[in-house]
Image (spheres, grey):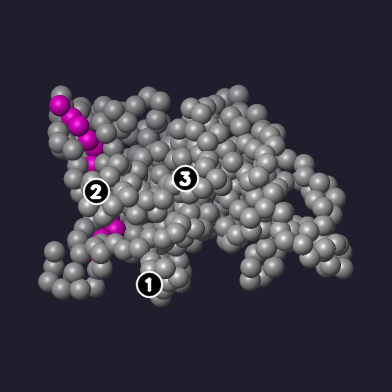
């Protein structure tokens, strides 16, 4: 650790009771951005609407002179340029990518960090070369345990100066089922700078911390990787002194396309009485989503939504799935929500799964809605239908 870094890089902490979002969290929220909830209408998220989280700075990365080194416990170390990767057979995968901290700001007590609500998600068509092909070409030696991926972004976190680096187990890196990509294109065009130009990792089904951007090196090791982002960050802990469990695959989640129109400040939605088509997207890193349920009363009751069929060609395996539900809106206040269940039987909880890092909070979304007549007046001023809460969709 460099001299004085501990003075500027503070330990992890929880917000005090009643403590609002501070200037440090506001600065993070201004640098990083969520996907607007209305962008759930798109099958594929336009790059400028896709969520972005950058730990440090966006590197001044130029394709000219960029090299990807593949080494460590391999027989034939490789050094590859982006143009050499583009000359190889390409694979395109549609993948929903979600930040592990999505939903953090909804927890109580709130872990002080990037204050995500529910918009840290997006779906893109990523094009690149399967990682397993590159590793096989390099020749992985017996005894390999992890594959470490290091990006060009450099910074300080909790007093530790570092390049951003994460690892995958060797079985995941070589897996046939989980086709990890070294990607060079997003939605048919070059990677935008904020999304990792010129090269990045794409790990279908895993939270965003595994998708290392600005990829510079791939290193096969015969010991478990113990870098900061692996052994310290991205762990599910209840107490500060626990080792915790690693954050890995995306937990099931469903979100609504906000119906009607919003109030500017509160983001409360306004709809007219009568039939309202509710729709949204659902996804999971543990398997295909097989059920989505919708509630219009804050989770007191649930009804099944209709799911779009999965693409016959399997292209939707790692992408969100559209759902829809016809709701008859009655005058008054309502709290909408949707919950997903995947093929493993995992279902979103109504109450949040708390941990000190604020990771994998896939609690059911709560979307306040006012059903009002065209003159803006609700039929009554009774209490909301279901427990009201903050608009978790902005």
Q: Nearer the viewer, mark 3 or mark 1?
A: 1
Let me know if residue 243 is in the magenta part: no
Q: Which mark is residue 272?
A: none
Residue at x-position 40% and y-position 31%: 179
**Region of the chain picked out in magenta, as a range:** 143-156
Mark 2 secondary-structure assignment: loop
Residue at label 2? 242
Q: Which residue is mark 1?
A: 24
Which residue shows up at 18% across the image and 69% down it? Answer: 6
> Which residue is under mark 3?
97
Residue 170 at x, y percent in the picture:
26, 31
| Residue mark closest to the camera, 2 vs 1 | 2
In depth, the one of 366 and 306 nearer the eye is: 366
Residue in front for this viewpoint, 53 or 265: 265
Earlier in the chain: of badge 2 and badge 1, it is: 1
Q: Residues within 10 Å of mark 1 (few under 14, many from 20)?
A: few
Q: Position of residue 187 (x, y in %)?
A: 52, 45
Q: Secondary structure at mark 1?
A: helix
Q: Secondary structure at mark 3?
A: strand
Query: From this viewpoint, is residue 93 visible?
Result: no
Image depth: mark 2 or mark 3 in front:
2
Gap in Å between the C-alphas at discs 2 and 1? 26 Å
Question: Would residue 131 appear left or right of 93 to someone viewing this image?
Answer: left
Residue 278 is left or right of residue 161, and the answer is right
How crowded pointer 2 is (Cα within 10 Å; few <14, some 14-19, many 20+) is rated as few
């Amino acid at each position: 650790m460099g001299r004085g870094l501990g003075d500027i890089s503070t330990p992890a902490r929880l917000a005090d009771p009643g403590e609002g979002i501070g200037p440090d969290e506001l600065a993070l929220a201004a640098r990083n951005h969520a996907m607007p909830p209305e962008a759930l209408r798109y099958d594929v998220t336009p790059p400028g609407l896709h969520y972005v989280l950058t730990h440090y700075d966006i590197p001044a990365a130029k394709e000219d002179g960029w090299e990807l080194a593949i080494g460590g416990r391999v027989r034939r170390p490789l050094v590859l340029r982006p143009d050499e990767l583009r000359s190889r057979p390409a694979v395109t995968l549609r993948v929903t990518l979600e930040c592990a901290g999505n939903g953090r700001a909804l927890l109580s007590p709130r872990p002080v960090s990037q204050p995500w609500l529910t918009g840290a998600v997006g779906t893109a068509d990523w094009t690149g070369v399967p990682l397993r092909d590159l590793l096989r070409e390099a020749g992985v030696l017996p005894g390999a345990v992890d594959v470490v991926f290091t990006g060009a972004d450099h910074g300080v976190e909790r007093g530790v100066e570092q390049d951003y680096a994460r690892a995958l187990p060797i079985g995941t890196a070589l897996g046939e089922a989980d086709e990890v990509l070294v990607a060079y294109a997003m939605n048919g065009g070059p990677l935008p700078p904020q999304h990792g130009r010129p090269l990045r990792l794409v790990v279908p089904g895993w939270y965003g911390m595994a998708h290392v951007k600005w990829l510079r090196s791939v290193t096969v090791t015969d010991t478990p990787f113990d870098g900061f982002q692996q052994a310290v960050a991205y762990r599910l802990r209840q107490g500060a002194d626990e080792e915790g469990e690693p954050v890995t695959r995306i937990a099931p989640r469903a979100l609504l396309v906000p119906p009607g129109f919003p109030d500017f400040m509160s983001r409360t939605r306004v709809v007219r009485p009568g039939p309202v088509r509710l729709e949204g997207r659902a996804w999971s890193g543990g398997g295909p989503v097989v059920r989505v349920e919708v509630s219009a009363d804050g989770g007191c009751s649930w009804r099944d939504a209709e799911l779009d069929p999965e693409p016959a060609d399997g292209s939707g395996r790692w992408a969100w799935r559209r759902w829809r539900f016809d709701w008859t809106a009655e005058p008054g206040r309502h709290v909408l929500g949707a919950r997903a269940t995947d093929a493993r039987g995992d279902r979103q909880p109504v109450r949040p799964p708390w941990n000190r890092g604020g990771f994998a909070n896939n609690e059911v979304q709560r979307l306040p809605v006012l059903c009002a007549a065209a003159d803006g007046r609700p039929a009554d001023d009774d209490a909301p239908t279901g427990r009201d809460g903050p608009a978790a969709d902005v």
